[in-house]
Image (cartoon, grey):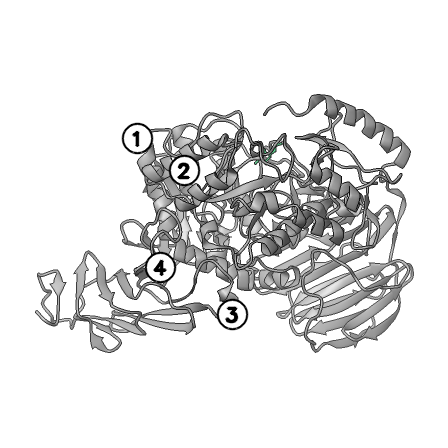
């Protein structure tokens, strides 16, 4: 992977041992104490404070289905501070208190907490009375650690915690909370880049969430130490968590993201295909890549510049030999319809001749050791210092450095190495926990700030983009993250490997990320490390085309991996799936809008398609894109057919449009050009014509694929860029699809909002029509022109309609032999 400043990293390893000896590592000591019995209960505005023998617990009703729990040994509760939490003031919620012989009860409309008098253990129930969470032990603590120990029922499946490389169900493992660059991860590698301490428990009947609102070093043990225990541990700060009681995953995520914030709508080009490698350099190489994409008609919206565009890895500089005129290059690329995303690392080279370093020193924005000297550690540029992103001053300073990157025409920022990572030959590639942080004036240490660092770097970069590109939606992507990072940036799953197993892993990683609030995520398609052969590359493109973030990215020691390097038949297949991605943009974009509004994941585990069906619980080799589309990717070498269990209900093969009954195991053929896709009956999937990049030409026709059945679909439209959507420049499309009692189909279409798209014409294909219909009506009038062939009714409307009816023939009607019907003929 290239030489990583070996001398400096050996030196750092030696220094670190010395510093550790001087400043002392974090330690735990002493016996655990625990709450003991309840002494008194006092009501406050939104809940109760329980004073127990050895400490106090404060319960606060946040929302009808959410209770916050805080613990303080001292019994004193200040105003809580959390970088993760976006919403601190909530509307009033009615609650009631109860007192029995054994317990006190705090009841909100959809969640109840019962406090056991003799032990201070808490039990949470949902509106149906199900126990959703119960303490196995009372809250306990000792020097340097506090713990929450819960029961973990046998039928509970465990999700969340962002993209852990372990598979979909997280049970049976302990997850350390300490953002770490694993360099290249392998299956079961814990920890990796991000800590999202949001736990999602699901049974067949309900779901619940638990957000551990503590950024300090810790761990979450999901039945590893003891099968039936779920444990949370934190090293510092207040023990504080939130319990969410939703009936289903969707409602839990909705509330969790109301608390920690939601993703602002990205520009639509961010949903296109992105091409990256470490590194496309020099400028002519970037030109060649761009030109080849266009020449070969492979749609692409963004090209990435990895660390080699910089002058000796100095952030906010350009290597003027390799990129003599960045502004010229970037405007050529813009003319070809490309956006360029540039990488930034947090480390600032400690070089007295480097203006950025010098200004940061002057403005005092770098992290310091307890002795007041800047902390120095080696990364790509050699010995470097690190901005303290927990300081508002440092974030503003960071944003003020952006000019040289953004001005020439960079569209987005790629925040890397922000766990943060330093190169240490002695292991532990981290900044030590005694390094000091401003923490919004609270003066804490890296023990509390480490897990927040990446998210706050992303926040500073986002603020810079907002300031420097007014009127544009920021595109910002981060490797490290903490809960709430969705407000600032999208993510990718980091340095994966070009193996079939990592192809498979990318599904569960992106799924769990979406179940943790960070929906805009995707793997390095084809695997960062190592070379992918043509087959693996093609299969990964097929899968990647269905994931929220779709980018090919490769390490510096790999052979070329552009979509055309494998020749035929691969190139055509690859193009076909990238084209499909572009056709599906209006659908994907609607899912992004819904995520942005409600926190719903963009791709979803199959069990969400039918939560009552236990057969779907463990499925991690298929997934849903929204509600309408099921993806069954091919994950094995040489696999020419695959088995799959289709959820109950009616489905359609996306390619042949033939209806298929669900609730059964199917075997489908999977030649290399086939990744099975199924559409759900009652759904409407919108498509656009293929474009080489978003906005290449105004879309002049919306293509609606209607799958006969009963269902409802909500879609979203706006300009795809700019901020007008925040002042009414959008519209929602609501479709209701109904099977008529006579066998026909009715489609109602309601539109709400000011936005007017470029298209007027709407082409509709209605699939699953058994017999040739008698008539097709549009808004009560006979449709001017329609066709029927092989179970499909097709018609075109000159403008969006409110209602379409496919009316069945009378039983006695003789089927017509012509395919074309016109009232004018
Ligand atoms: O130490 O910038 O995850 O995407 O290509 C490696 C070089 C640093 C790690 C990122 C990867 C990127 C690489 N970076």
Some atom of ligand 1 lies within 8 Å of the CB belonging to the residue at label 4:
no
**Label 4: which residue?**
686
361, 194: nearer the viewer: 361
- Mark 1, Cα crowd under 10 Å, few <14 / some 14-19 / many 20+, is few
Q: CA distance from mark 3 to mark 2?
A: 35 Å
Q: Secondary structure at mark 1?
A: loop
Q: In the rendered image of this protein, does residue 606 appear above or below residue 292? A: below
Q: Position of residue 618 (x, y in %)?
A: 52, 47
Q: CA distance from mark 1 to mark 3?
A: 48 Å
**Label 3: which residue?**
727
Q: CA distance from mark 4 to mark 3?
A: 25 Å
Q: CA distance from mark 1 to mark 2?
A: 20 Å
**Label 1: which residue?**
568
**Label 2: which residue?**
290
Give the mark, 3 or 2, whose residue is nearer the N terminus: 2
Q: CA distance from mark 1 to mark 4?
A: 30 Å
Give the mark, 4 or 2, whose residue is nearer the N terminus: 2
- The answer to whether residue 550 of the structure is visible from this angle is yes
285, 751: nearer the viewer: 285
Q: Position of residue 160 (x, y in %)?
A: 61, 51
Q: CA distance from mark 4 to mark 2?
A: 29 Å
Give the mark, 1 or 3, whose residue is nearer the N terminus: 1
Give the residue at x 10% y 71%.
824
């Amino acid at each position: 992977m290239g030489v990583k400043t070996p001398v400096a990293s050996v030196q750092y390893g030696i220094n670190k041992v010395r510093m550790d000896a001087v400043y002392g590592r974090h330690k735990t000591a002493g016996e655990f104490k625990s709450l003991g019995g309840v002494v008194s209960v006092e009501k406050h505005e939104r809940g109760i404070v329980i004073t127990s023998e050895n400490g106090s617990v404060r319960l606060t009703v946040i929302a009808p289905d959410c209770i916050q729990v805080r613990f303080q040994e001292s019994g004193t509760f200040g105003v809580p501070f959390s970088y993760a939490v976006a919403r601190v003031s909530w509307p009033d919620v009615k609650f009631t208190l109860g007192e029995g012989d054994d317990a006190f009860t705090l009841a909100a409309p959809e969640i109840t907490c019962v406090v056991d008098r003799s032990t201070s253990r808490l039990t949470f129930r949902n509106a149906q009375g199900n126990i959703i969470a119960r303490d196995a032990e009372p809250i306990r603590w000792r020097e340097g650690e506090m713990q929450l120990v819960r029961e973990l029922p046998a039928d509970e499946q465990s999700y969340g915690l962002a993209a852990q490389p372990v598979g979909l169900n997280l049970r049976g493992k302990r997850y350390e909370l300490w953002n770490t660059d694993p360099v290249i991860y392998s299956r079961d590698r814990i920890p990796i880049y991000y800590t999202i301490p949001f736990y999602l428990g699901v049974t067949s009947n309900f779901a619940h969430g638990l957000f551990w609102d503590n950024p300090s070093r810790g761990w979450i043990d999901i039945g590893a130490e003891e099968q039936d225990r779920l444990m949370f541990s934190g090293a510092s700060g207040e023990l504080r968590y939130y319990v969410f009681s939703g009936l289903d995953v969707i409602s839990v995520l909705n509330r969790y993201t109301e608390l920690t914030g939601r993703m602002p709508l990205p520009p639509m080009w961010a949903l296109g295909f992105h091409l990256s490698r470490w590194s496309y350099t020099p400028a002519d190489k970037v030109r060649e890549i761009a030109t080849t994409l266009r020449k070969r008609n492979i749609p692409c919206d963004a090209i990435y510049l990895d660390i080699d565009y910089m002058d000796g890895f100095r952030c906010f500089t350009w290597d003027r030999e390799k990129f003599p005129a960045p502004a010229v290059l970037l405007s050529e690329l813009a003319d070809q319809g490309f956006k360029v995303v540039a990488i930034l690392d947090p480390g600032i080279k400690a070089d007295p001749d480097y203006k950025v370093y010098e200004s940061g020193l002057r403005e005092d924005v770098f992290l310091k050791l307890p002795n007041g000297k800047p902390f120095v550690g080696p990364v790509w540029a050699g010995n470097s210092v690190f901005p303290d992103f927990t300081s508002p001053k440092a974030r503003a300073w960071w944003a003020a450095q952006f000019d040289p990157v953004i001005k020439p025409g960079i569209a987005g920022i790629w925040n890397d190495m922000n766990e943060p990572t330093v190169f240490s030959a002695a292991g532990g590639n981290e900044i030590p926990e005694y390094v000091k942080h401003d923490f919004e004036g609270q003066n804490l240490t890296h023990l509390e700030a480490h897990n927040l660092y990446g998210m706050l770097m992303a926040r500073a970069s986002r603020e810079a983009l907002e300031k420097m590109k007014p009127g544009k939606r920021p595109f910002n992507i981060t490797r490290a993250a903490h809960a709430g990072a969705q407000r600032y940036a999208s993510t990718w799953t980091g340095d994966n490997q070009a193996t079939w197993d990592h192809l498979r892993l990318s599904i569960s990683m992106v799924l769990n990320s979406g179940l943790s609030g960070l929906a805009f995520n995707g793997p390095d398609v084809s695997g960062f490390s190592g070379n992918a052969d043509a087959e693996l590359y093609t299969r990964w493109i097929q899968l990647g085309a269905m994931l929220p973030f779709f980018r090919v990215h490769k390490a510096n020691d790999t052979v070329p991996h552009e979509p055309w390097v494998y020749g035929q038949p691969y190139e055509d297949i690859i193009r076909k799936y990238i084209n499909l991605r572009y056709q599906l943009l209006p659908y994907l974009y609607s899912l992004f809008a819904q995520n942005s509004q409600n926190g719903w994941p963009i791709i979803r585990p199959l069990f969400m398609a039918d939560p009552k069906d236990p057969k779907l619980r463990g499925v991690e080799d298929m997934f849903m894109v929204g509600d309408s589309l099921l993806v069954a990717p091919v994950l094995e070498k040489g696999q020419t057919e695959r088995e799959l269990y289709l959820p109950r209900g009616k489905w359609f093969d996306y390619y042949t449009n033939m209806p298929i009954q669900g609730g059964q195991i199917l075997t489908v053929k999977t030649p290399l050009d086939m990744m099975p896709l199924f559409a759900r009956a009652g759904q409407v999937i919108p498509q656009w014509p293929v474009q080489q990049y978003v906005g290449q030409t105004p879309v002049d026709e919306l293509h609606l694929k209607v799958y006969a059945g009963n269902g409802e679909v909500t879609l979203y439209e706006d300009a795809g860029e700019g901020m007008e959507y925040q002042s009414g420049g959008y519209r929602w499309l609501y479709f209701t699809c109904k099977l008529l009692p006579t066998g026909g189909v009715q489609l109602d279409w309601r539109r709400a909002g000011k936005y007017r798209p470029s298209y007027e014409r709407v082409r509709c294909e209605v699939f699953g029509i058994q017999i040739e219909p008698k008539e097709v009506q549009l808004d009560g009038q006979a449709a001017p022109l329609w066709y029927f062939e092989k179970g499909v009714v097709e018609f075109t409307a000159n403008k969006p309609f409110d209602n379409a009816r496919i009316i069945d023939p009378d039983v006695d009607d003789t089927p017509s032999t012509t395919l074309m019907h016109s009232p004018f003929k």
